[in-house]
Amino acid sequence: MKRLLLVLLFALVAVLGFGRPAGAHPLGNFSVNELASLDLYPSRADVAVTVDLAELPTLQEKPGAVPGYAAQSCKAFADAFAVTVDGSRLSWTVSTSSFALTPGAAGLSTSRFGCTLTSPLPSSPSTVDIRNDYRADRIGWRELTAAGHGVHLVGSPIPAQSISGGLTAYPQDLLSSPLNMRSAHLSVAPGDGPSSSAAAKLPGASWLPFSRWLASADETLRGWVADPHVGPAVGVLAVLLALLLGAAHAALPGHGKTVMAAYLAGRHGRPRDALAVGATVTATHTGGVLVLGLLLTTVAGLAGERILAWLGVASGALVAVLGAVMLVNLIRRRGAPAPHHHHHGQHDDHEHDHDHGEHGHHHHGDERRHGSRPSRLSLVSMGIAGGLVPSPSALVVLLGAIGLGRTGFGVLLVIGYGAGMAATLTAAGLLLIRVQDRWSKRLPGLTARLSRIMPTGTAALVLLVGLGLAGRAFAGI
Amino acid sequence: MRRLLLGVLAAAGLSVVLLGVGGVIGQPTTPRAVPTAAPPVPALEAAIARDQQRLKDLPGDYTTWAALGAAYLEQARVSADPSYYPKSEGALQRSLSLRSADNAPALTGLGALANARHDFATALTYATKALAINSYSADAYAVLTDAHTQLGHAAEATDAVQHLLDLRPGLSALTRASYDLELHGQDDRAASLMRQALADAIDPADVAFCRYQLGELAFAHGDLPGALASFTAGLAADAGYLPLVQGRAKVYAAQGQFDRALADYSTVTSRMPTPAYLIEYATVLRAAGRTADADAQLQLAGAAQTIFTANGGLDDLGGAQLAIAQHEPADAVALATKEWQRRPFADVADTLAWALHLAGKDQEALVYAGKAQALGAHPAQYLYHQGAIEYALGQRDLARASLKTALATNPHFSPVDAPEAARLLTILGS
Amino acid sequence: MRITRSVLALLAVGGVALTALGPGTASASSHREAPLIAADPAVDNTDVYAFVSPERAGYVTFLANFIPFEEPNGGPNFYPFATDATYNINVDNDGDGKADAVFRYTFQTQDLRGNNTFLYNNGPVTSLDDKNLLFRQTYTLESSFNGGPFKVRATNMPVAPSRVGPASMPNYGALRKAATKTLPGGWATFAGQADDPFFLDLRAFDVLYGGDLTEVGQDTLAGYNVNNIALQVPFKDVALKGDAKRNPVIGVWSTTERNRVRISGASAPVGKDRVQVSRLGNPLVNELVVPAGLKDAFNSISPDKDASIPAVVKRVTDPELPKLIQGIYGLPAPATPRNDLVEIYLTGVTTKAGGPIKADLNSQLNNADVNPRRFQPAEELRLNLTVPVAAMPNRLGVLAGDLQGFPNGRRLTDDVVDISLQAVEGAAQTGKLVDALAAGDKVDVNDNMFGGSFPYVALPNVGAVNKGGGTGQGAAPAALPKAFSTTGNSNMTTTAVTVGSSAVAVALGALLYLGWWRRRAVTR
């Protein structure tokens, strides 16, 4: 009895220590294991297929003996692999097929064939349904992967990379059942996905804690948009968050704040002007995001980054033009000491008192105010320039919402975003004007000196900044 | 002041409107899906998923490792997917490594695994060890029952199954009790217990198992419509349970519907190309006149057996049956003899008898034919073998009686052998 | 003999060793493999409660629950009682470990679904005999006293069905009410689905597997339902000699039984005697006292046999849990033998058994008419019927001075995990709660409120319990990464910060804007 026990103990040890006999198929000798890797592009879909047959199926099929076996099997696979994009089933062309035998257990061979299938897509996909029915009657590993190029998958239920190394190294995890993924439903959105765009586009992302908070707030907002179970309370919160995000993004360098500040300072703008610029920026920005979002979702093949780059160029160009106009005006005015242009008459009535007060105030000072007040046109153009480049985070939120069928919500969020931006820009402008007023009271001497060079200086600055913006955007194309 | 108030009110009003609209539009566009009554996840799969999750959280839980190992083993049987066997073994060994003393569940699981691998002696040892730790373990008694039964220890097997019935009279006990009765020739009681087990079955696979056994019992007594009804009812419960398809194929072959039979056999052997199924497939192909295909399937069966042995499996009974099908009686005798020495089980005796008969050693064959029926079970196939042996030995009266009883018990017991039995009987009748 | 053995052994070794870790085909020959671990939840006891009815003087209530972890959306078969088993509530009033009163429930099914549907109902169900209810059960209640034959007390009583959902059962309360019956003679009885009244964090017992008590606080059973049998009988029907004043203590446990099947002895018919398949008295005995290995034994034997199994007694006198807790928390395990646990679990708290807890609370030895020589230590839930109903029940029961609480019987609100943890660490003996374990499993109340009248248990839950794991098919990860989920705690913080700062920003913006307006108004 003791000997028996000892011997059995040895057996236990042997079982534990004994390796697998060489050549036996790890998933069983009659398994047919399949991997289909789907690659989605805006205008086509590719599938890379690998099928690994164990000893017995190989023997049953006798692949070596059948000529054109690989091509036949790939055709059979293509027929059984149903991918439905936006409701219509794709028909595959087999681009390549290959086949190989490897020695297996007991002097038999295992075999493996591979295919690449391709099919064009009529438009950028938004929903994809996959169903793999090839050899459904056979046991074995069934794996699906999907990756997007130029499009990205929203909440994909299948991974982007094979966990079995392309059916070469089946994971022997004790805590997972054998993989049997035969169907999947994917949601696809245009663009390369949230993580790549936002981080790259955030200018001044060096203010680490602030930008990290911003990034996480961005993600939260996007999460709320995507979550199907979000209730009304969260909807309200989302709009508030969009407001805040807009304000925060506007606080970062960009949107021509420098330019606007310089402009307003140089032109002795008033609160009303600050308001006007703010409003224009908002309107332009919101409109720009909406238009761009609409374009990106309806027109296939439109690359968001390129458009943004071109818009950056346009914005910079507009600013440069404004600066040039300012300079030209100044030079012209310098040249001709023409009568002062008092824009009294052009101001609305309810501004009259205010103007008088200010005007009179400044008038006593000096000739600083020889420059004309910011004309409505220039204010508007300043606003347009500032709002021309849509903020990527707003764009992404809108696109995400559209992709999930919640367009109205997305638009509302963008409007909220814009309102937040407006608030910041207006506040910045107002603050600047206030500061300027105080300064001019406190330091008349300095102000007097500055005021002489101000107009030209600011005009030059505007021009330079505009050129710089345009140049940078152009370089980024 | 009024303007201020108006301004504030305007701002507030606008914000409320904005936020309100946001709240409303932010509602999900599709109503939350009402869960419809989908077919339930079988309790076994749900248990596996739960155990996997628990072990990810608490890897030291040796009880759940043992339970998971047993569940994987059950799943391997139900789904016919052999990739569960290494998982089962891994989980059970992990449980044992976490707690080596008094770990009855792990030992029981390893015993069940050994049974599945036809290593009945090891299973017996494991079950005995488990019972030494926990003498009230119904699972250990179940493993013990299976091991004793297959090893040919009839009295111990009955004793074990009675212990099992006295501990936990449920599905596992009733199905084993039914088998024990069947081995002793009490088919009516066996069927009644199997029906009781069917009433206790919850998972579709368990329902399918019970239906299959009831169908087999009906078939064994020539009740083809009853058998077909059982198999069909089983497939309605679990369409993927292969033995039911094989049972149905047998009925079709018996009824002469060879097309349907062969289609079903093809399904079965694609998914589970075991030597036993392949031999049956080949037999029916031969009966249908497709000899070349039959030979191909036998070749496949040979390959399957070779692989099984190369993987470390030990099944000389299957090897002997294959050798018989391949007309190699000497090999069959050698293998069957080895198996008999390992385990004096009724099926082994019958195979050995037939192999000896084919090898021309009819005297010895008759002895083993008698041993096969020692417990009281007289299936048609055993009687046919006995009759053929008696005929070869010239014992005409005995042969006539045996063959007559064989065909009376089940006139369709084999598409090839039943006609042969009838032929012999005609000769004898004269 | 030896040679053959070693040959056999070597063959076994050869077979086993070569089998290695590689897969093998399941059955190369026709070798029957029967199911081994078939699920059989219908006979699984989960809890027993016994307490003096708070709103009905002179009556004691027994609650017995079965079938753990019933998911509210468990269709289409839901959770019927087993029809081939009996469900029993047993009462021992003389301390010999054998039942003196047995209340037996047997169930019958009426399944009108046929083969056409697997749905429980085909329309709203507004009453227990609504024709839309396709699957229904009824029960028969029998009782036997002092070993006498069973007498039928009620038959064809309706079972409250599994709660399918609000659309199918718009007023489940009415169904519950209709299934709560009072029999002539005063007995009240109920059988049907209910909210699982047990509240605990099962992870507290991960201590047994290498965990610790840090991850607690979630009611593992929240949201789940259970099948409940409730019975309310007068004291005189269960007390020894019918006199609850002289013999106030009873021991209670529930069992499920199936008919015994005999196959050895060819002519023996299926007998009338029964096999006990499950048994439960005190809660958490299996977790705290009896380890997994003895659970099967415990389920099979009747209480009078407990003391005869040395392994069981040893687990009470020398429990594993305090040693584990000592290893983790450094709390010194109380000295063995743990005769205080013997008192709590096996004899009842009394001064008459020589145990360390000096109080006469709930042992049958304190019954005046008991023969102490026939007293048998046995695992039972012991209740003293004369302890007055506490006006303000304390969840820590006896350990907090509320003598009506566990281990003197068990009320729905008693936090048995915390009480048991304290008791296993010796709190009953010392009279002081162990501070380090004061928080226990941090689950102190049930997720649903209990009712004030029989059967007291809350209505079944109706929403799906959100559990992970899926079907184990390598299921897809959640569509949103966890950071995006709106249910995580961290996101609440972000939300709060967001809302707060937006409010501040808006306010500042408004102020700034309005400030300018004011300035303008002033300067005008």
Image: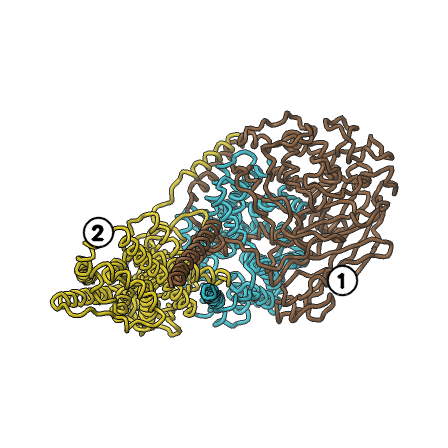
Chain colours: A yellow, B cyan, C brown
In the rendered structure, the answer to whether residue A58 lies left or right of residue C147 reads left
Q: Which residue is mark 1?
A: C178
Q: Position of residue B116 (x, y in %)?
A: 51, 49
In the rendered structure, the answer to whether residue A448 lies left or right of residue B234 reads left
The Cα atoms of the two marked residues, 1 and 2, are separated by 94 Å
Q: Pick whichever, B298 or A466, lies toward us.
A: A466
In the rendered structure, the answer to whether residue B214 lies left or right of residue B87 reads right
Q: Position of residue A178 (x, y in %)?
A: 43, 54
Of tags 1 and 2, the one toward the viewer is 2
Amino acid beneath label 2:
Gly
At horizontal 30% and vertical 49% (from top left) the residue drawn is: A207
Q: Position of residue A76 (x, y in %)?
A: 34, 69
Question: What mark, if any, has residue A445 been given in the picture?
Answer: 2
Q: Is residue A256 visible?
A: no
Q: Pick whichever, C18 or A70, lies toward us.
A: A70
Q: Is residue C168 visible?
A: yes
Q: Is residue A165 above or below residue A391?
A: above
Which quadrant, please, contains the N terminus of chain A?
A: top right
Q: Are marks 1 and 2 on the same chain?
A: no
Label 1: which secondary element: helix
* Disc 2: CA contacts within 10 A as few (<14), some (14-19) or many (>=20): few
Amino acid beneath label 1:
Ala
